[in-house]
Amino acid sequence: MFKKIGKKTEKLIVLAIAMVMVLGFGLTSVSAAEYPKRPITLVCPWGAGGGTDAVSRILATLLKKELGVPVNVVNRTGGGGAIGHTAMATAKSDGYTIGMPTVEITMMHWMGLTKITYRDMTPICMVNFDPSGINVLTDSPWKTYKDLENYVRDNPGKLKDSGTGYGGIWHLAMAGWLKAIGLSPKAIKWIPSKGAAPALQDLMAGGIEMSTCSLPEAATLIEAGRVRPLAIMADKRDPKFPDVPTLKEMGINWSCGAWRGIAAPKGTSSQIVAVLEKALAKVNKSDDFIKFMNNRGYGLYWLDSRSFAKALTEADDANGKIMKAAGIIK
Amino acid sequence: MMLEHIYTAISLIAQPYVLLVIAMSAFYGLFVGAIPGLTATMATALLVPVTFFMDTVPALAAIVTMEAMAIFAGDIPGALVRIPGTPSSAAYVGESYALTQKGRAGFVLGVDVTVAAIGGLIGAIILILLAPMLAEVAMKFTSFEYFWLACIGLSCAVLVTKGSLIKGMVSLLIGLFMTTVGVDITLGFPRFTFGVTDFLNGFNFIPAMIGMFGVSEVMRNVSSSDLSFKIVSVKTKKIFAGIGRTVRKYKLNVARSGIVGTFVGILPGAGADIAAWIAYALSKKFSKEPEKYGTGHIEGIVDAGTANNAALGGAWVPALVFGIPGASLTAIVIGVLFMKGLRPGPMIFQQTPEILYAVYVTFILANVILIPFGVMAIKAGNQMLRVPRNMLMPAILMFCIVGSFAINNTAFDVGIMLGTGVLAYFMEANDIPVAPAVLGLVLGRLLEDSFMVSMIKSEWDLTVFFHRPVRAILGGVTIILWSSPFIGVLRARWRRQ
Amino acid sequence: MRVSNTAIGLGLIVFAIAVLFYTRTFPTLERGYPGPSLFPNVLAVLFIIAGITLVAQGVRGRERLSKFDTSTITRSGLINILLVLGAVVFYIFLSDFLGFQITSFILLFGLMKWLRVSTRWGLVMACGMTLAIYFLFAKILLVPLPWGLWGW
């Protein structure tokens, strides 16, 4: 194969390649005038295939239309989100690397997994919030929320609950709920799992009795008539599950859920934040985004940069207290 | 009724646009599968925004086709340069490469593509006929059953080890130990990370696999004295001769591995890679010529190559019936269905059967066109063997680097690749086989997590591992498998006396 | 590069003992049940068993402990291997600064040149491969290859 090509052709190939390289690199040289000038990287701290990945990809596609530059999703997974959050916090604060922080940013540092906190980021907006549900099997003896609560009161330590890993958001949701009804956070045994899907499978198989995961995560099994949601830990009912009561309306002061937002590294200039905030606000109201979120069953939620920052401060503090009270951290 | 659905489904597929999408995704899948480090999951995730603006049928057809192509294409670099393109090819990469060195690359890959297509069809047929029933069975698996499954998988290590059994065990232990690095399941405690954030993710499987197979192979190749010659001489004529005969000879293996592969695929948490290991080990166990394994014997390749493609159909079973993803790829499928306003679950069987049947038809179509597309890819791949090694090796090294980087977009994984590459080189130089270590990497987390979770559930009562019939049977199988070599040794010793 | 079974066995034992000591710092589950440390400890014990078996085999086979056999590999082969490893290290540390294209080109051309590929073919292959990988990964598959001096 190599001998067949003559010397002349060889020279031509070298020349052609050299020219392509010069042209290719010359055209893409960086010149920073107005933001954004070049592709933006969106760090997703969870793996391809998950909910956060899907939301970040659709957001990136729609954001591209608003900003006029490609927005590329980059998955940085592992360490229960610690690796991805670290990557988005430690990136250059030039506005060309942003990320999709999730609720774990207010929890991981309490667990000692990372030193990164929300203070290492510039919050831009929050786009989604899904409250925790309390889900049991349809053929279980607990028909209403009260049935379950009474059972737990009478039989502390007997039930097993799962939905995510140790110290994850659904673990915290369970602990906070038990605390709010005056029980020990260990009145239900927490079984760690790799996420909501394996936990729900274990629920179906009879390995655990309940799962405190969000309703969108359990939606297929709820609709199949296998799983019954008894309550959600939210301030108001989910329009897609209007029959499921909230804990609030039963007089229990506890709300908890997972959220997703957009943030840039700390020290990103306010002009860049403003550009992104404006574009994302538009995306958030676009029909495509609303349709996507509704179809996936994810709760639409909007907080702008300032209110997101405030919410983060409050949530971080509250989560730390609950994790301590629940004995999740020492 | 059913015929009507099939007719509707075919008319949905047999449109120029859909067929074009299928052809494009076939190329995409072959390409992604053949390059180590690029996974079908990643490729599908990239398609998500595209599928958002696509109809449901072409979107699903694209995913099904790509998946089938990618799992086969993983065999191509495996056979040619001993680097599995996807984790599913890792089980038999040594075997395939041994045949390539005998100058039979075309034959190995020809058999691979044929059995992959047959395996895919077996998986599809089981999916079509038995999905709802099998999903119920899979849903009965708790952490206890998964623990036994992992144990059965581990017993494959003995069967894939050549030479010293003790060195095979050392290798398996090394692989298992590597999986303990990172966040632990019971308390979320960071183990052996020494404060390095990137280590929280442990030894990422794909860079480790590329290192152990790819980098160590490059090291071995450049260490030989004459680099200017080619890996093997390639016969241009009749590279595909003898395939039909081989497949006919091992038709029982194909049937067995097709079924085993599908069942492993159905279990959420196990997948095409574990299916291939188990099929390979079963193959050796039941073979009439187990002594030939590891020296370039086609039988094990037939089995494992069938099983990994069959597992793909299986993985769709829990996804379609209960909306529970068995693997990250089916998680994307569920996401796509959601996006289209469809709910996977029993409802999909009643409300939108035409979509379901369209998936079935695509499954069959994809596996049928796998053969012509696959043969094209093999012919292109074979050209690689004509390149002199002193040009090929640097190029392969570069692909290894970029592939390791691409999976999690970090130079840290390139470091993992380098470290595991040096380790594997050292191991092989000292007759410690690499295959058991890779098996350990595949199964370590499943083994530990299922055990620890089970113990937390039962409060350290070990008898719970035998409480239910399925568990007890799996446990019994494990104990028999594990004790059989010892019984064999004892019997041999007794006879000698 | 071969070392004696005895040396491998001893190495495993030392490693396992270090693991056993280190895992004592790991937290335990409620009521003192082992948690994160259980699996590593079980593996460490198995490592020790395997290590002792290897040492026993070595002693029985009258193996020299200090056997360090490099005869299977030539001097130039060893240099080639070290260069390959060096190339990967070069990529890990310099790709962020230089960017993918430059790093890849230097790495490919350098290695090919060392392995006695002609300058002309080395240039063709190094440029061609760099461009091909770059377009496939960065442009089609949107992998964020290191940016570096030149941009992408």
Image (cartoon, coloured by chain):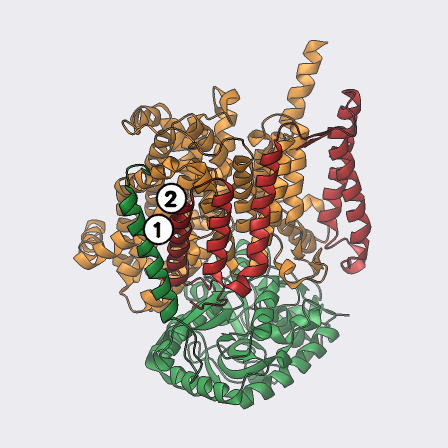
Chain colours: A green, B orange, C red
Along the polypeptide, which appears first: circle 2 or circle 1?
1
Name the one closer to the observer, A320 or A238.
Answer: A320
C47 relative position to B24: left or right: right
Q: Nearer the viewer, residue B189 or B168?
A: B168
Q: How far across and how far down the image is residue A247, in percent? A: 58, 80
Query: Would you identify the image quadrant in which residue A163 lies?
Result: bottom right
For residue A240, what is the image quadrant?
Answer: bottom left
Say the numbered circle drawn on residue B29: 1
* Foreground pick, B258 / A55: A55
Judging from the image, mark 1 belongs to the subunit labelled B
Q: Residues within 10 Å of mark 1 (few under 14, many from 20)?
A: many
Q: Chain of mark 2?
A: B
Whether the residues at callouts 2 and 1 have beta carbons within 8 Å, the answer is: yes
At mark 2, the secondary structure is: helix
Asked if residue A239 is positioned above or below residue B230 in the image, the reply reads below
Residue A53 placement (x, y as % from top left): 46, 67
Q: Position of residue B301 (x, y in %)?
A: 43, 32
Residue hosting label 2: B73
Q: Is residue A151 left or right of residue B392?
A: right
Is residue C130 in sight in this rendering?
A: yes
Front-most of A281 and A30? A30
